[in-house]
Amino acid sequence: MIEQPERTIFSVKRLMGKSYRDIEEHKEFFSYHIIDDETESLVKIEIGDHFYNPVELSGHILKYLKSRIEKFLKTTVTRAVITVPAYFNDAQRQATRDAGKLAGLDVLRIVNEPTAASLAYGIDQNTQTAQTIAVYDLGGGTFDISILRLEQGIYEVLSTSGDTFLGGDDIDRSIVNFWLTNHDIEESIIKDNRNRQKLRLLAERAKRHLTYETSFEGDFNGTPLQLDREELETICKPIVQKTLFACQKALQDAGIKASQLDHVVLVGGSTRIPYLKMKLVAFLVKK
């Protein structure tokens, strides 16, 4: 990420099923080169002399996961169930199936991530009465909120809302902007891709540190950088607010109030942020 940022691919999930025009306004977020081929086809990423689309890259990820699982289970894996965001359209779901095939997997089913999360928490076990569940999923690159109805072992998605370009990566970028505003870091230094990624990784480390501590101190090329939890809360506020607007929309679309929820399931590393938990409890949990 630091030594060869132009050859290091991250947040590829944001590109699934997207054309260049879909992500053009966000292209500065990526350190690698996304090709504008002036068509509505899937985006292409240039790495050296090679070009990749998101399906091929996801296939590489799944192939690696397959090898990890086979090593752990000490047996060959040929079939899989793959999860996707509930808001994924047919093209994105098909792209995920294609990625599984590229990895040598027979994809038995594509399951919505909120349903998978509820199953993982065992909410479907021993439920005699119908349950209404909110699954709040804020990962590194994407956010979605889904309202589910569970009755007699059957899950129904009542509504879903979210943002395919909202996640922990955006919090990291906001921390970087905060440091650039409040510290004497020359703009020419940040224009170097390696320095920009180095600072972004430091911001991610600060965010994680402040989950458990109240202050963070780091160093960027000899410049001391600090961040405390109160400052992080101010930085996170607009991003958290966007997710709460989506939560409100999901509740309205489902035709229910927050007080009618039986369970709230948190998914994704970004939900560990104390400020986010506090705001979400105030908004979603029964009063």
Image (spheres, helix red, strand yellow):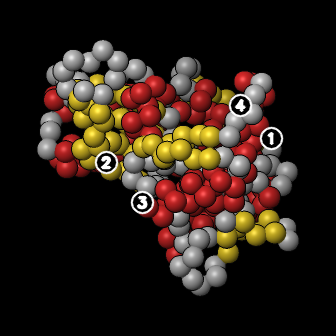
Residue 13 image point, x, y percent: 57, 53
Q: Nearer the viewer, mark 2 or mark 3?
A: 3
Earlier-in-chain disc, 3 versus 4? 4
Name which of mark 4 and mark 1 comes first in the sequence.
4
Tell me the kind of residue under disc 1.
Gly
What residue did someone put label 2 on? Answer: 160
Residue 106 at least partly seen: yes
Residue at image location 64% in from the left, 82% down from the top: 37
Quarter in which the C terminus is drawn: top left
Residue 73: x and y in percent read 72, 24
Residue underneath mark 3: 89
**Residue topped by disc 4:** 69
- Which circle, 2 or 1, is nearer the viewer? 2
What amino acid is labelled 4 in the image? Ile
Q: Is residue 170 above or below residue 35?
A: above
In three-dimensional space, the C-alpha distance between marks 3 and 1, rounded to whole angstroms, equals 47 Å
Q: Is residue 148 visible?
A: no
Mark identifier at residue 43:
none
Q: Please identify the residue farthest to the top as the structure is shown.
A: 126
What amino acid is found at the position of numbered circle 2 in the picture? Answer: Thr
Pinpoint residue 38: horizontal percent, then vertical percent: 59, 84
Between the residue at mark 4 and the residue at mark 1, the CA separation in whole angstroms equals 42 Å
